Amino acid sequence: MARARQSLIYVGIKSSVVAFDRKTGEQVWRTQLPARYKSSASLVNVVRDAEGLFASCAGEIFSLDPRTGAILWGDPLKGLGTWLATIATDLGGESNAAASAFMQQAAQTAATTTTAAN
């Protein structure tokens, strides 16, 4: 019998990425990112898409295995500074769809409000 796929949520904090079981809240894994500049590594941006998990902190980007937290690769983004980098992918998942739906709804609400005011 095939094992059900575990549904995880990912938190980026203090140069770490932590995965939790969505249903139980149990911590599944924790990975300390090897950022070279620890003083600016507190903020961690995490993005999960259909094929991977990515995190950035202290001006570096990392790819992690979403099931285990193992670091697959990293890039120091040399010459670009050490602050938080944002991440986007072409393979966005539900969160991108939700954001798009929210923006669409906000635009419709604004259009309706403008029409009603005239």
Image (cartoon, rainbow, N blue to C red):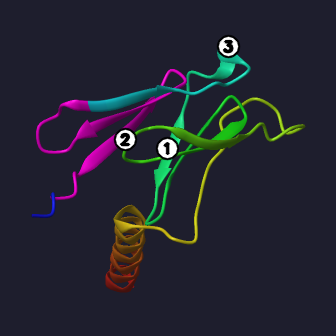
Three-letter amino acid code of the residue under disc 2: Tyr
Q: Which mark is residue 61?
A: none
Q: Quadrant of the N terminus?
A: bottom left
Question: Marks 2/3: CA distance?
Answer: 22 Å
Residue that badge 3 annotates: 39
Q: Quadrant of residue 76?
A: top right
Q: Quadrant of residue 62?
A: top right
Residue that badge 2 annotates: 10
- Which one is earlier in the sequence, the residue at label 2 or at label 1? 2
Q: Nearer the viewer, residue 59 or 98?
A: 59
Question: Marks 3/1: CA distance?
Answer: 19 Å
Please rate how many residues cluster around mark 3, counting C-alpha atoms within 10 Å: few if below 14, some from 14 to 19, many from 20. few
Considering only vertical position in the picture, is 71 above or below 87? above
- Which one is earlier in the sequence, the residue at label 3 or at label 1? 3
Residue that badge 1 annotates: 46
User: What secondary structure is marked by label 1?
Assistant: strand
Residue 54 coordinates in the image, percent (x, y): 54, 48
Q: Nearer the viewer, residue 85 or 9?
A: 9
Three-letter amino acid code of the residue under disc 1: Val
